[in-house]
Amino acid sequence: ELGANKIALGHHRDDIVETLFLNLFFGAKMKAMPPKLATNDKQNIVIRPLAYCSEKDIASYARQMEFPIIPCDLCGSQENLQRQKVKDMLQNWEREQPGRINNIFRAITNVEPSHLADTNLYDFKNLSQAKADDEDPLFGDIANEGAALSLANTEGSKIEFIRNK
């Protein structure tokens, strides 16, 4: 009727990080929520304009602007839900190491498929040595050729990484 093709949702950075952990812990997937996503039928676009904002910053802004806060029982704010437990875990981590939630979010935006194990994203089966040399930072970096690396708690043992030619 309106001709609209965008659906704006209020998910913020912390929701996205919580969703990542919910999917890791309970869905065995490395999956979160993107800031922008086409619907399956490609007719609409879901946008999350607050995706890069922390919940704390949004709450602070809402207080400054004197916006009314309307509780939502559908968004996982109820006690004893898995989302609330993950939120509590992340808040504890943030208290121990400030900036941790932001680093996790930044990691979501900086994925290296070749350093994970999803064969749908990276063709490990057909990986050739030449390709491995080009992509592996240890073997692809001339400064590391033949370098010995010490491992923690190995009582002086060393492993040598040597490029075969």
Image: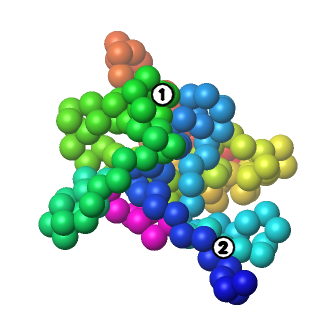
Q: Which is in the foreground here, disc 2 or disc 1?
A: 1
In the image: residue 95, left or right of residue 76 = left
- Between the C-alphas of marks 2 and 1, the distance is 29 Å
Q: Which element is circle 2 on?
A: strand
- Percent from the top left, x then y, of residue 63? 18, 61
Vertical order, 52 against 90 (above or below): below
Q: Which residue carries the number 1 mark? A: 81
Residue 158 in view of the camera: no
Instruction: Give residue 3's mark.
Output: none
Q: Residue at x 79, y 63 (%)?
A: 40
Q: Residue at x 79, y 49 (%)?
A: 120
- Percent from the top left, x then y, of residue 57? 24, 59
Q: Residue at x 42, y 32 (%)?
A: 78
Q: How many other residues sit within 10 Å of disc 1, few (<14), some (14-19) or many (≥20)?
A: few
Question: Could you tell me how many numbered marks the image carries?
Answer: 2
In the image: residue 40, left or right of residue 13 = right
- Residue 97, quarter of picture: top left
Three-letter code, disc 2? Ile
Q: Which residue carries the number 2 mark? A: 45
Q: Quadrant of the N terminus?
A: bottom right
Towards the viewer: 17 or 82: 82
- Percent from the top left, x then y, of residue 74? 51, 43
In the image: residue 91, left or right of residue 45 = left
Write the start and end of the magenta stretch as one range: 48-54
